[in-house]
Image: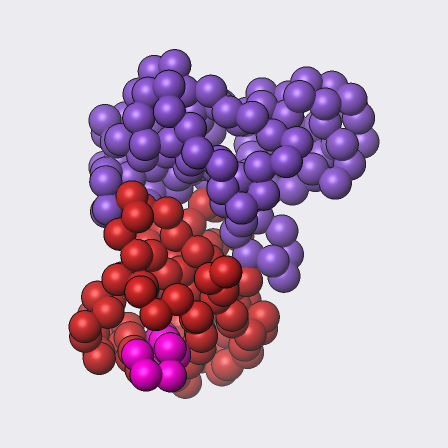
Amino acid sequence: DVKVTQSSRYLVKRTGEKVFLECVQDMDHENMFWYRQDPGLGLRLIYFSYDVKMKEKGDIPEGYSVSREKKERFSLILESASTNQTSMYLCASSRLNEKLFFGSGTQLSVL
Amino acid sequence: GEDVEQSLFLSVREGDSSVINCTYTDSSSTYLYWYKQEPGAGLQLLTYIFSNMDMKQDQRLTVLLNKKDKHLSLRIADTQTGDSAIYFCAEGNNQGGKLIFGQGTELSVKP
């Protein structure tokens, strides 16, 4: 079975902190994605990557950056966390043009 | 830009059929997906339909696609309490797995 693992289930951070959300997949997938999920808004794409060291902006990249130094790992970085970044963050991976597999999510609270 | 719309809530009685509806705007969509999210979990792919199909059936699930009206529906026959979850509609157009998601429909199944 494909496994997409997000390092933390819950995180609490303070405004202005630098935050790292980590995601690892074990199926050698080319594509990796970061979405945020908010009630009534569904999932919105933050960043995605088609290959190592490649990154593309999604629909809401402001306030975020990403890193993909290895194929299996895709990190989401909040340079200076703000309260409006409190959300559920979902990582996903896929082969090119195939279905997405999701991690369990990280619920981030910024106080 | 592309948009996917769903109603936010649906309540049914156990044993009834549930129909969850979705509309989308991107006429170049290649695949349309239904994902299920149980409480505290990530998204799990339920089923998908290729854009040149009208219907797909998979056990208790029936997907109907009206491409002219850009309308997608998911019917769950004999709905059970274990079907209570949030259901997301998503569309993709073979651009490397990038999907656009709806807001999610929360299905509540009452005994």
Q: Is residue A2 above or below residue A100?
A: above
Is A49 within the magenta? Answer: no
Q: Residue at x 58, y 70 (%)?
A: B8
Q: Give percent across and percent down for residue B26.
A: 39, 66
Q: Is residue B26 visible?
A: yes
> Considering the image in quadrants, where does the C terminus of chain A appear?
top right
**Quarter of the view holding residue A12:** top right
B82 lies left or right of A20? left
Looking at the image, residue A82 lies above or below residue A59: above
Report the chain shown in purple: A
Looking at the image, residue A1 sits to the left or right of residue B109; the answer is left
Q: How many marks?
A: 0
Q: Colour of chain B?
A: red
In the image, the segment drawn in magenta is B67-75
Residue in the image at 63% along x and 61% along y: A40
Question: In the depicted view, which residue is nearer to us: B14 or A105?
Answer: A105
Residue A78 at what x, y percent from top left? 64, 25
**Figure colour scheme:** by chain
Q: Residue at x 78, y 36 (%)?
A: A83
Instruction: Depth check: give the residue in front, B54 or B82.
Output: B54
Res B40 seen here: no
Say if B16 sits above or below A47 in the image: below
Image coords of residue B77 (percent x, y): 32, 80
